[in-house]
Image: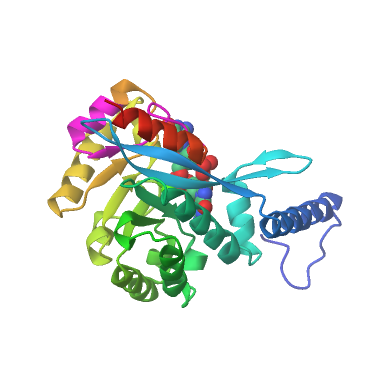
Amino acid sequence: AKGSGRGRYMAYEPHMDTRREEKNQLEADLKYAIENDEIKVVFQPVVNTLTRRITGVEALARWNRAGYGPISPDIFIPAAESSGLIDQLGLSVLRKACHEAAEWSAVKLAVNISPVQFRNPGFAAQVMSILAENDIPPSRVMLEMTEGYFIHHPERAGTAIEKLKQIGVSIALDDFGSGFASIGYLRRFGFNRMKIDKSLVVALDEGGRSLEMLTATVALARSLGIPVTAEGIETEDQAAILQLCGCDELQGYLFSRPVPAEEIAQLLDAQDAP
Ligand code: C2E
Ligand code: CA
Ligand code: CA
Ligand code: CA
């Protein structure tokens, strides 16, 4: 900000020290939690739009911080990214998710990947060995990434995505519509699926031209042969609209919240019961 540059006097602000200390404490606690296996994984079902059967699950990290209670991944994932802990955290989520998914024969497994992990040159090899350890065929696995890295480092991102596709996993463009990614990205980087951000679904209730935008977006993705999942579906009205738009898969509280692995097993048993 103006006035805070080099050589300028900066007023002493005690709250800045406090904030720094809080951040350090958060990172120290997170490091401890990762090393002591306190990061858990829950799974949210993804359903086929027409049949409403579970076709896949998305793994989501959970941290119950001692003395504080649950901390949102929107807080601890960025903290892990900025403190060098994300590689370890991300691989541990992938390992746990694969370990559970090995019990659920056919369903696909989606795992979120931070751009910080993605730019590590050894990442594809690490993914491959975790899948092999758990006997998970790569064709069952989808890695979800947001657009940031693709915008800022398109060349390197292109190379990294190629490596992953070579080992046989699919790649989804996550949070579509929440940032600057355009349909062009889907084709340029060879994404296998687009996930529509929940902000676009919520916007439907506010009217405007969001229905037209959503319809056009999904139609364009589909014309490129790229299937679309809509996230954050909370009501039957939203589900009906996204079905009309042509989304083949839906995800949201309407179908299920993210739940522990045992509950996924029960949900799958229930839908296969005669
Ligand atoms: P995301 O990948 O977009 O995941 C979807 C988020 O929407 C999840 O939040 C999920 O609980 C929430 N959600 C699902 N259905 C609904 C609904 O119907 N309504 C509403 N309001 N919310 C819904 P969560 O679990 O808090 O995760 C937040 C974000 O943190 C994720 O967004 C993802 O970007 C990140 N994240 C979570 N786990 C991991 C991880 O293991 N690795 C990385 N790199 N990021 C993760
Ligand atoms: Ca995701
Ligand atoms: Ca998302
Ligand atoms: Ca997100």
Q: Is residue 11 left or right of residue 190?
A: right
* Along the line of sight, the residue nearer the viewer: 95 or 147: 95
- Residue 249 is inside the magenta segment: yes
Q: Position of residue 28 (x, y in %)?
A: 76, 58
Frontmost residue, 165 versus 155: 165
Q: Quadrant of the N terminus?
A: bottom right
Q: Quadrant of residue 46?
A: top left
Quadrant of the snapshot with the C terminus? top left
Task: Reply above or below: 216 against 116.
Answer: above
Magenta residue check for 71: no
Q: Which is nearer the eye, 88 or 192?
A: 88
Image point (28%, 33%), residue name? 53
Looking at this view, name the residue that lies furthest to the front: 274
> Residue at position x 20%, y 35% from top?
245
**Disc count in the image?**
0
Q: Is residue 53 above or below residue 26?
A: above
Q: Answer whether residue 224 is visible to the viewer in this image.
A: yes
Magenta-drawn segment: 239-259
In the picture, measured across the screen, residue 70 lies left or right of residue 236, that is right
Determine the residue located farthest toward the top in the rendered image. 236
**Horizontal and vertical percent for residue 167?**
32, 70
Residue 162 in the image: state x and y as whole percent. 31, 72
| Residue 220: x %, y % from top left | 17, 48
Instruction: Please give the name of the residue rendered at 64% of the width and 56% of the height, measured from the top-left corner.
Output: 79
Q: Quadrant of residue 92?
A: bottom right
Relative to 203, residue 36 above or below:
below
When the figure is inspected, residue 143 is found, relative to residue 231, above or below; the finding is below
Asked whether residue 209 is in view, the answer is no
Q: How are the residues colored?
A: rainbow
Q: Nearer the viewer, residue 40 or 136?
A: 136
Residue 250 placement, left or right of 129:
left
Instruction: Classify residue 154 by image quadrant.
Output: bottom left
